[in-house]
Image (spheres, rainbow, N blue to C red):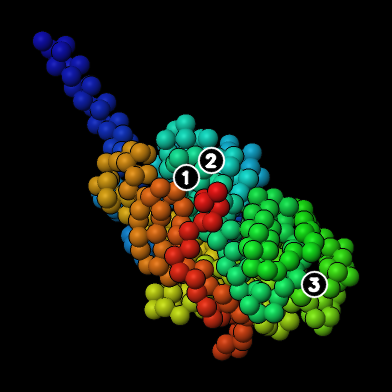
């Protein structure tokens, strides 16, 4: 009798020591945010991390009885590293959601881990059409290159641009941009006279631009990933391409808000198509830009920031909808079909494709209040990823 009471007491004491830790684990909702914080894609990581933290500061970190914990990992944009980090986050940290994915190869490398572990993977940056098909657990809050490219190919021939040379980074999103721009421009009676591809890592644009100069198209269509636009713009101007009558057009990745203001007046007049501009004239965006700048030493948010901010929104709302009790499948179900206003404008997560449906804007670089901005002048509403129709 005595012994039993003693044992029970010990067991209880042991439990009370263990319990807080067990409870703590159960009460925490972990988001494993894998981003390129260093290396060539570092601006993407910086923007998304800042936006995720802003979302949490504005919306609190106690949601449906859970303490939301953001675990940020730097994958240096090397896909093998992304994959290893995702594995560690799932197995050791037992994260509830994986998120981030600065470039397409990182997202593709992580997709199988999301599927095997039934963990939702919220893609906040990578933008190759096929990523959502790589795992049924992928939900995307960024955009797709076909969305942006098709809209520009509709605009161009109506504005005197018939003969175009394309120049893209030689990997998933670039190949999507090239393909969808060319198909649509050709359909609209225009012509892509040459398609050039530059390596993703350390590209030297000079020899390609020289070739474009010799070909003398009406315009050069460019896709390079966020962060690389300055180099293209600089070399385009240095070679006097604009003076030779060649227009620069592209997806908004080229006139990225993170870099645009430092590109100088040579960028004035460049027309791009994209889903987000820091100059988007909505009350919600004005508040977002102001709060983001205030929290980040006056840094202007770019489209990557918005992908991160909206990605957090999708995760928070799924956590609320499942009352903090949902596993991966329940969270995923609650992410599908979410419809809301973003700083970019209205958007929703297509319940079938898990991809983002959103407005695509045509914008022109203008000086406003002394600063360079992508000023929206036209909108194509509720654009689904054209890559899904095939
Ligand atoms: C991508 O790798 O999918 C990617 C990265 C940066 C961009 C767009 C797409 O700006």
Q: Which residue bears the numbered disc 1?
A: 138
Q: How far separated are the C-alphas under marks 1 and 2?
A: 8 Å
Asked where in the image residue 18 lies, by quadrant, the reply is: top left
Q: Is residue 163 left or right of residue 288?
A: right
**Secondary structure under badge 2?**
loop
Which disc is residue 217 wearing? 3
Q: Quick one: 195 or 258, which is closer to the camera?
A: 195
First in sequence, mark 1 or 3: give its number.
1
Q: Is residue 89 visible?
A: no
**Secondary structure under badge 3?**
loop
Q: Residue at x 69, y 50 (%)?
A: 171
Residue 10 location in percent, x, y?
23, 21
Q: Is residue 240 left or right of residue 269?
A: right
Q: Nearer the viewer, mark 2 or mark 3?
A: 3
Q: Is residue 211 visible?
A: yes
Q: Are marks 1 and 2 in contact (CB under 8 Å)?
A: yes
Q: How far separated are the C-alphas under marks 1 and 3?
A: 39 Å
Q: Which residue bears the numbered disc 2?
A: 134
């Amino acid at each position: 009798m005595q012994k039993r009471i003693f044992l029970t007491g010990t067991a209880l004491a042991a439990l009370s020591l263990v319990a807080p830790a067990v409870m703590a684990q159960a009460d925490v909702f972990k988001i494993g945010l894998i981003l390129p914080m260093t290396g060539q894609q570092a601006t993407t990581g910086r923007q998304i991390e800042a936006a995720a933290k802003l979302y949490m500061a504005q919306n609190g970190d106690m949601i449906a009885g859970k303490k939301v914990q953001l675990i940020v990992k730097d994958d240096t944009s090397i896909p093998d590293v992304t994959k290893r980090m995702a594995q560690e986050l799932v197995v050791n940290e037992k994260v509830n959601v994986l998120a981030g994915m600065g470039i397409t190869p990182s997202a593709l490398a992580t997709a199988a881990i999301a599927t095997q572990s039934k963990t939702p993977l919220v893609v906040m940056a990578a933008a190759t059409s096929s990523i959502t098909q790589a795992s049924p657990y992928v939900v995307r809050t960024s955009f797709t290159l076909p969305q942006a490219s098709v809209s520009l190919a509709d605009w161009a021939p109506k504005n005197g641009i018939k003969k175009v040379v394309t120049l893209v980074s030689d990997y998933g999103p670039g190949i999507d941009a090239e393909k969808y721009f060319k198909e649509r421009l050709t359909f609209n009676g225009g012509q892509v006279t040459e398609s050039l591809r530059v390596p993703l890592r350390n590209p030297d644009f000079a020899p390609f631009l020289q070739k474009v100069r010799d070909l003398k198209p009406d315009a050069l269509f460019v896709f390079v990933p966020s962060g690389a636009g300055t180099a293209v713009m600089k070399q385009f101007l240095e070679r006097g391409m604009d003076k030779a009558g060649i227009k620069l057009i592209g997806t908004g990745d080229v006139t990225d808000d993170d870099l645009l203001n430092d590109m100088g007046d040579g960028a004035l007049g460049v027309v791009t198509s994209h889903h987000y501009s820091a100059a988007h004239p909505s009350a919600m965006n004005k508040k977002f830009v102001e709060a983001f700048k205030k929290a980040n030493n006056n840094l202007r948010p770019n489209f990557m920031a918005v992908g991160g901010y909206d990605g957090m929104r999708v995760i928070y709302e799924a956590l609320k909808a499942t009352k903090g009790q949902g596993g991966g499948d329940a969270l995923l179900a609650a992410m599908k079909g979410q419809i809301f206003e973003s700083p970019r404008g209205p958007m929703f997560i297509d319940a079938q494709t898990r991809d983002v449906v959103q407005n695509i804007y045509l914008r022109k670089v203008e000086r406003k209040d002394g600063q360079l901005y992508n000023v929206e002048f036209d909108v194509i509403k509720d654009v689904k990823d054209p890559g899904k129709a095939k």
